[in-house]
Each structure stands twice: as C-alpha cells, then as structure tokens.
C-alpha cells in the first residue's frame, strides 16, 4: 500500500517536469519550424501549394551562388579556426607552467563573453581607412596614404575566425586537459616524432572536443549576420543577409521561408556528414 | 613536446611567440575600443586628442555621453528587462528539463532529448524567423476566428523574450544536467527512508546540491540574452534592445559614445565571467 502511493507521487512529479518541457519544445521548436516549411510552399498572397519559391532559388544565380559561397566559406573558416585552436589549447594544457594555466584560462574566457558586436566594432576601428592600423602604418612610413583594409573577403574571414574561435578552443581544452601526459611521454621515449604524436595520440583523443567545437563554430559562422554585414565588402554577401532582405526588406515571407529552410537543411546535412565521417554520435558530441 | 619532457629552446620560443601573437590578436580590438572611449575627438579613431570623460558624462550639445544618451539608455533598460525575464524563465524550465532527462524514464525520451539539443544547431536567424512566422499565423488565426488580439504575438518585448527563451533554455538545461549527473542518489534514498516525500527531497536536497549550477546557468542565460542579436533582430518591436540599437549606430557611424558603452559592457561582462569562473572553481573543491 505504501509502495503504491509512492509510485503515484513519482508519476505526479514526472508530469510537473514533463509538461513545461514538452510545451517549450513543441510550441517553440517543432511547430515554428513546421510552419516555416509550410509557408515556404505557399504562393505570393499566401494561397495554394507551389514550388515557385524553391524554383526561384535554383534559377536565380545570385541566390544559389550566395548559398554555395556561404557554405564553402563557413567550412573554410571552421578549418582555419581548428588549425589555430589546436596549438593554443595544447600550449595552455600541456606546455605552460601550472601556475600560468589558470591566468591563461581566464584570459581566454573573458573575451568569450564579450558580445560579437563589440568585438566586430573593435576590428572596424582598427582596420578602416581612418583606423588605428592605418594611422600607425602611415606614421612609420610603410604606407604613403591610408588604404581601406576593411570591407573585403579577407577582413570578413578574419572577423569570422575571430568571433568564433573561442567556441573551438574551450571544448578542445576541456578534452585535452584530461589527456594523460604519460601517453605522450611513452610515445616520445619510444622515438615517435612530434607529427606522429599529434596524428596518433593527440588528435584521436581530442576528437569529441574537436567535433563539438567544429559543429558550434560552423553553425555560428553559417548563421552569422553581423560580421559579414559589417566587415565584408559589397560583394561579400552572406546567405543570412538574403534571408533578412526577403523577410524584412521585401516582405516576401514565402521566399524568405524557403531560403531559411534551405539553410537549415544545408547545416543539418553538413553536420550529419561530418559526424558520419568521423564516426561520432551527435548526442554524445554535444554533451 | 610537453612540460615534463626536455624541449629544445627553439621549440619553446617559437611556441611562446605564437601564443603571444594569439593573445595580441585576441585583445587588440577590445583594448583599442576601450582606450578610444577616452579620446577627446568626435570620431572613434586616432589621432589622440587628449583624455576626456565626455563620452561618459558629457551633457551635450555636441558631446553627449552615455549617461545622458536617452536612446542608448532606453536600449540598456530594455535589454536588462529582457535578460532578467529570459534568465528567470529559462532557469525554471531548464531545471525541470534537467530533472526530466537525468532522473525520469519515459517513452520517446531519446526523441525529446534530441529536440532539446536541436536549438544548438539551428542558426539563430532561422529560429527568429520561424518563431516570427508561427506567432504571426497564430495571431491572425485568433483575430479572424475569435476577434482576440494578443500583443505578444507580434514583434514586441514579449516576442523577444519568447524567442530568446527558446534556445537559451537548452544551454541552461545542459549546465544544470552536468551537475545533476554527478549527484549521489543514495542521499535521496536516505531522505525517503527518513520519511521525506518527493517534493521535500527535491527542495531540501537536490536543489540545494544544484544551487551553484542554477546560479551559473542563470548568469549565462542573462549574458546570452543581453548580447543576443541574430534571433532578436526578427522579433524586436518599437523598443529595440541594446545590441540592435548599437548595430544601427555602428553601421551608420557614430561618436565614441559607442566606445564608452563598449567599455562598460566589457568591464562588467569580465567581472561577471571571472566571478562565475571563481564560483565554478569553488564548487569543484
């Protein structure tokens, strides 16, 4: 009798937890995205089923070219971020003295929390024609007159690397910190070269951190709006800007939904392929 | 190779140089932004024209400091209100979600867990437009069929809170789940044996144990909400939040008052981040 009343109470508590969580996920995640999909198939005026919005994407080169460019650049930025992050994480976890380690971690984590907008603004002050770097270079005589360093693809890529790299470094530090030093020592004693140690020990061990960092960085870059808009040039159009233009500027919600859904499809597919290639499990990587 | 092994001088020097350049790269934009907040010039650029506090305290007419800048102060107030609402809501639901996924077993748990972490891989822009379209459709439906008009279903303060809540709750859930996973459940059993009911066990034991992660989760939620741009962009009404307001000024060019705002934000987020880190270290011990 006592047992029964206890199990009933546990069910009761289950629903207290379950209902808000289920409402959150269905009302704010599932249904809005189904609505996005539904609206992307509506014709202008909101009536009837049509594929025109998707057709427009494939027939207008400006749309699909921006899309492909955004995807390729996002992959490229993710790779640069990975190449920069691995040695930084390695230095902090394995080379620096234990005492410096704590300070370096704080130095890494503080800018992590400063908003993307402010960090991009800092680069704009540095790079633009009247910017700090130009003033400096003209003064030491390297430039005769100021050159516009901002508003091109290189400055945009640098900005994207800058705003997203901490999301790679932090998860990699998390995994690398738990890598047992004696594994590297043993390999070294057996005569392994640095490259071999990286390839055979460090990279495989850090794979979960590398994957979760890569997924987060890739998503942030692909969905970035501020950095390409403020640091890229006239020709550095990002796909999120296309979506913004359709929804807010042209008020063409059907076309914007189709673009949004395509971006969502693309990001899920690239992540899925990356997880398959490295044989990682999504729910485990995210933890 | 590593600190316990003999390393050549060249290897160490090279590595240190790389780290030095990395940290320079990391901090240069932040430091330049902060320094130029004190430049006595109408533009956020060099040359240095002397030290001034006008961009903080100036009352106009040409130099309006942040403490007298009505539009930016409105933005800060709005952002504070949004961030407080979001962090309260997402901490409550996030705690419930942590209990649900760590302590309960039910059908389709895997599917629901997948949905819970999905917002991490949905671009913020897409989340924003999906919620905009969905609430708009509901609003039209309610108005056409029942003649009910609900303000929070159109771009407004309420919609911004809803939109940010939808993905920040995921982050909070993960922060709290990580600690709940380490909870020793024999403590619960001991409390049951001593006659406590489920509610008392959660309130007096589990939540007490979770407290550092709940505070940490709420702080993270507050910061993420305060800084959010991508999702907010589509949901914001007439009262814009600070990032949206700043974005327009950065895009169109503005006085160093933005630097003054950045200065305040960088300093306060740093303090919050270090405090959070310090508390996190303390709870580990």
Image (cartoon, rainbow, N blue to C red):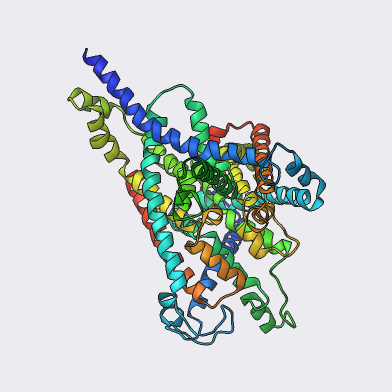
State the quadrant of the C terminus of chain B: top left
Q: Residue furthest top?
A: A1
Above/below status of B63 relative to B224: below
**Where residue A281 sits: x, y (%)?**
58, 31
**Going 51% across and 54% down the picture, which residue do you hit?**
B155
**Where residue A59 sits: x, y (%)?**
82, 46
User: Is residue A287 among the parts visible in the rendering?
Assistant: no
Residue in the foreground of this view, choosing between B14 and A259: A259
Q: Residue furthest left?
A: B194
User: Is residue B31 among the parts visible in the rendering?
Assistant: yes
| Number of residue marks | 0
**Where residue A23 sits: x, y (%)?**
44, 35
Q: Is residue B220 left or right of residue B229?
A: left
Residue in the foreground of this view, choosing between A86 and A270: A270
**Where residue A277 sits: x, y (%)?**
68, 33
Q: Is residue B6 left or right of residue B175?
A: right
């Amino acid at each position: 009798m006592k047992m029964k009343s206890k199990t009933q109470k546990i069910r009761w508590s289950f629903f207290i937890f379950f209902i808000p969580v289920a409402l959150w996920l269905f009302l704010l995640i599932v249904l809005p995205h189904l609505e996005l999909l539904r609206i992307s198939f509506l014709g202008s005026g909101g009536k009837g089923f049509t594929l025109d919005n998707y057709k427009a994407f494939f027939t207008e080169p400006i749309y699909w070219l921006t899309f492909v460019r955004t995807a390729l650049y996002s992959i490229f930025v993710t790779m640069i971020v990975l190449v920069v992050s691995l040695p930084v994480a390695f230095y902090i976890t394995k080379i620096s003295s234990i005492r410096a380690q704590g300070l370096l971690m704080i130095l890494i984590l503080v800018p992590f929390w400063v908003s993307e907008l402010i960090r991009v603004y800092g680069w704009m002050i540095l790079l633009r024609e009247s910017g700090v770097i130009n003033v400096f270079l003209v003064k030491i005589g390297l430039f005769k007159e100021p050159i516009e360093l901002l508003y091109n693809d290189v400055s945009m890529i640098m900005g994207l690397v800058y705003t997203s790299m901490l999301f790679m470094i932090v998860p990699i530090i998390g995994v690398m910190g738990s890598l047992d030093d004696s594994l590297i020592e043993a390999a070294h004693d057996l005569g392994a070269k640095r490259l071999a140690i990286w390839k055979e020990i460090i990279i495989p061990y850090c794979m979960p951190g590398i994957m979760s960092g890569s997924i987060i960085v890739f998503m942030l870059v692909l969905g970035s709006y501020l950095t390409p808009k403020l640091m890229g040039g006239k020709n550095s159009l990002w796909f999120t800007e296309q979506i913004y233009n359709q929804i807010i500027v042209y008020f063409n919600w059907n076309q914007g939904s189709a673009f949004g859904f395509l971006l969502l499809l693309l990001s899920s597919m690239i992540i899925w392929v990356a997880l398959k290639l490295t044989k990682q499990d999504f729910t485990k990587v995210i933890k | 190779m590593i600190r316990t092994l003999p390393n050549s001088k060249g290897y160490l020097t090279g590595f240190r140089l790389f780290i030095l350049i990395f940290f320079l790269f990391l901090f240069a934009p932040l430091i330049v932004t902060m320094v130029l907040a004190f430049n006595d010039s109408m533009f956020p650029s060099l040359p240095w024209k002397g030290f001034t506090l006008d961009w903080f305290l100036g009352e106009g007419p040409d130099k309006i400091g942040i403490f007298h800048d009505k539009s930016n102060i409105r933005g800060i107030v709005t952002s504070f209100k949004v961030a407080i609402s979001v962090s309260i809501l997402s901490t409550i639901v996030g705690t419930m979600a942590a209990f649900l996924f760590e302590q309960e077993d039910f059908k389709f748990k895997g599917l629901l867990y997948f949905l819970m972490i999905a917002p991490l891989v949905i671009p913020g822009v897409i989340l924003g437009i999906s919620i905009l379209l969905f609430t708009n459709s509901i609003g039209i439906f309610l108005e056409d069929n029942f003649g009910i008009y609900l303000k929070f279903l159109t771009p407004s303060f309420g919609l911004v809170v809803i939109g940010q809540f939808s993905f920040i709750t995921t982050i909070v859930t993960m922060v709290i789940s990580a600690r709940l996973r380490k909870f020793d459940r024999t403590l619960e059993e001991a409390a049951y044996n001593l006659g406590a009911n489920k509610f008392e066990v959660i309130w007096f034991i589990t939540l007490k144990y979770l407290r550092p992660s709940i505070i940490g989760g709420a702080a993270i939620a507050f910061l993420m909400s305060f800084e959010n741009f991508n999702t907010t962009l589509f949901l914001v009404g007439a009262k814009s939040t600070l990032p949206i307001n700043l974005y327009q000024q950065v895009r169109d060019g503005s006085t160093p008052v933005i630097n003054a705002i950045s200065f305040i934000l960088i300093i306060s987020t740093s303090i919050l981040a270090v405090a959070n880190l310090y508390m996190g270290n303390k709870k580990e011990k």
